Image: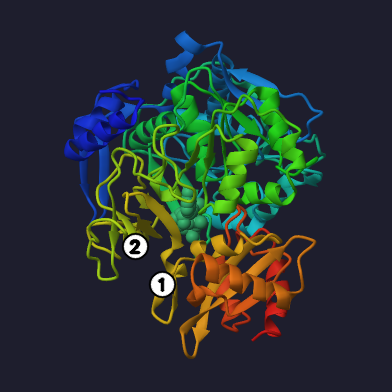
Amino acid sequence: MHSRIRTFGEYRAAYKRSVEEPEAFWAELARRFSWKKPWDTTLEWNFAEPSIQWFRGGVLNISENCLDRHLQERGDKVALIWEPNDPTEASQKITYRQLHERVCRMANVLHNNGVGKGDRVCIYLPMIPELPVALLACARVGAIHSVVFAGFSSRAIADRIQDAACKLVITADGMCRGAKRIPVKEVVDEALQECPTVKRVLVAKRLHLDVAMKPGRDAFLDSELRKAAQKFEAEPMDSEDPLFILYTSGSTGKPKGVVHSSGGYMVYADYTFRNVFQYEEDDVYWCTADIGWITGHSYIVYGPLLAGATSVLFEGIPTWPDGGRFWEVVDKHRVSLFYTAPTAIRALMAAGPEDVERYKLSSLRVLGTVGEPINEEAWEWYHHYVGKGRCPIVDTWWQTETGGILISPLAGITPLKAGFATLPLPGVQPVLLDAEGTELAGRGVEGNLCIKFPWPGMLRTTWGDHERCRQTYFAPYPGYYFTGDGARRDEEGHYRIIGRVDDVINVSGHRFGTAEIENAINEHEYIAESAVVGYPHPIKGQGIWAYVICTPRAPGEEQLQAEVDELVSKLIGRIAKPDVVQVVPGLPKTRSGKIMRRILRKIAAGETDNFGDTSTLLDPEIVDTIKEGALVKL
Ligand code: ATP
Ligand code: MG
């Protein structure tokens, strides 16, 4: 069998085998790695408790598989290219051998500071080389990393540290994002006032700021590293030992501490990376996500390094110094595989084509997107301006909980359709269920997206609260993993994600996904972005409220409403016309760029407080602005 699929026929065959003989299928893929001891049973599972065990009895260390395993063949190959925030600062290339040494040193530092197997380490770092090094060093000593996106408030950090009872924090003095300088250490200090479990804080110097250091607790990372030995024997880990905890983005509620395993996650991250992007040895791969999200864990660090790839680590933002920054980096490092999010694409699209047309982008071969449904206009723009019409776009659907991509085209192999995540990867068995939990057979159906068989990368529990894991993912439809998303399977069997199940709007008995309506609204020449929600309507059951962000030349609200009506009527039908169109300066987004629709729903329903957990919002003030604008419409 091939671990790398090359044709659609091979995809079909691999998929069939993965369903008929899942254990043999995954065992064969797992044998690519170095195991200190082979596993006894490939899979044991039930979705009732739930209990999921892959490669039980197997002993390994994922950092050895990311680094040591490549030293002989790829020791001098570049593992990481670090591109700093400021284009005038020099980039850095780190080979596999150098990365190995840095990780070993960092592992010694952790060990010297009392961190051992099973301990939790909070990592709150900007996108600098110390960040991936810290992840791999935790893995090497057997500690469980919990990365907190370095943009979160001290409240959000404290919540996550307390939930996981972290013993040590790795952070930086400060960070830069675009023109901004952020005093990171101060934010951590504030959080730690409420975190008695934290005994040590290691501080990387990024801006060389004069930071307060608490005696006995805080130490600079560089001086600790100088004292550390260059070798570190990787801790033997059971396949099911937790590798990391990562909190979800909080789009739908309080973030959940998703726990991933060592062995299964490794096999899955590697397989999906190589196949979805159709990775080749000389590719330069760039995922623009932050390592603070699952996308960065699986597809900046673990997946690419397991595959022995060259992965770009970018510290900056897409719009600084100008809207051409991404494309400049692509040309500079000859990036061939490029993976980003619809929110970034829309932001760059709104800036106009001049910034992208200045660059050649001739090295690009494959484009990817993740995070939310991509509207057709953004897809076409990405395809035309970035991919120059020749690069396939992989629209990858997955979640923090799934560890890796579940539904996606394989680049250049699966036929593409804008807005479609297309087909499940081998090993993934999606089903669509109706409200009663009955599987919807055949094609041209729409329902709750669930998965009926385990895959190696799936979550094992939610930290400290297994019952929450059961309740959230396995109790809604007994016997299935429930994703929380709704999807449609079209006449060709391709999947289109239509948004969160909770976001489905029911107008006089007609059900609409938010993505579908937004997709139509976004076609408007002067609308950059939109978010629609349902709200209680006396006649229709639910009415549709559209919040739209306009570009400068947009007409007044009244005329805009008329034009949006016409557009939606034409593209979907009169029934889907928004009842209210509200022009807003921004949308309440999580720091990972997702719209928190639950807040917009509350505003549309006339509720003015009780917005629940908003700790992951990027700009909490926008909520008040939108609220004020809504009041005149209610
Ligand atoms: P929380 O679970 O706390 O509400 P979240 O679901 O936003 O947060 P993530 O795990 O980061 O946290 O996001 C996963 C979700 O993102 C998916 O369930 C889906 O709704 C959306 N998503 C991701 N990729 C895609 C995609 N390619 N197409 C459509 N939706 C996507
Ligand atoms: Mg979620």
Which residue is at 55% across, 60% downward?
519
Against 92, is 302 above or below? below
Residue 179 lies in what quarter of the image? top right
Give residue 446's mark.
2
Q: Is residue 281 visible?
A: yes
Q: Residues within 10 Å of mark 1 (few under 14, many from 20)?
A: few
Q: Position of residue 575 (x, y in %)?
A: 48, 77
Q: Nearer the viewer, residue 555 or 484?
A: 555
- Mark with earlier residue (2, 1): 2
Kindly state the secondary structure of the residue where label 2 is placed: strand
Q: Is residue 42 visible?
A: no
Q: Position of residue 554 (x, y in %)?
A: 76, 65
Q: Position of residue 399 (x, y in %)?
A: 44, 50
Q: Position of residue 338 (x, y in %)?
A: 57, 34
Indicate the amino acid at tag 1.
Answer: Arg
From the viewer's perspective, is 15 left or right of 622? left
Disc 1: residue Cβ within 8 A of ligand 1's nearest atom:
no
- Whether pointer 2 and pointer 1 mark residues with C-beta atoms closer than 8 Å, the reply is yes
Residue 504 lies in what quarter of the image? bottom left
From this viewpoint, which residue is outermost toward the top?
72
Q: Which residue is mark 1?
A: 511
Indicate the amino acid at tag 2.
Answer: Glu
Disc 2: residue Cβ within 8 A of ligand 1's nearest atom:
no
Against 151, is 105 above or below? above
Q: Nearer the viewer, residue 195 or 614?
A: 614
Q: Quadrant of the N terminus?
A: top left
Kindly state the secondary structure of the residue where label 1 is placed: strand
From the viewer's perspective, is 435 left or right of 89? left
Q: Nearer the viewer, residue 285 or 569?
A: 569
Q: Quadrant of the C terminus?
A: bottom right
The image shows a total of numbered marks equal to 2
Give residue 472's mark.
none
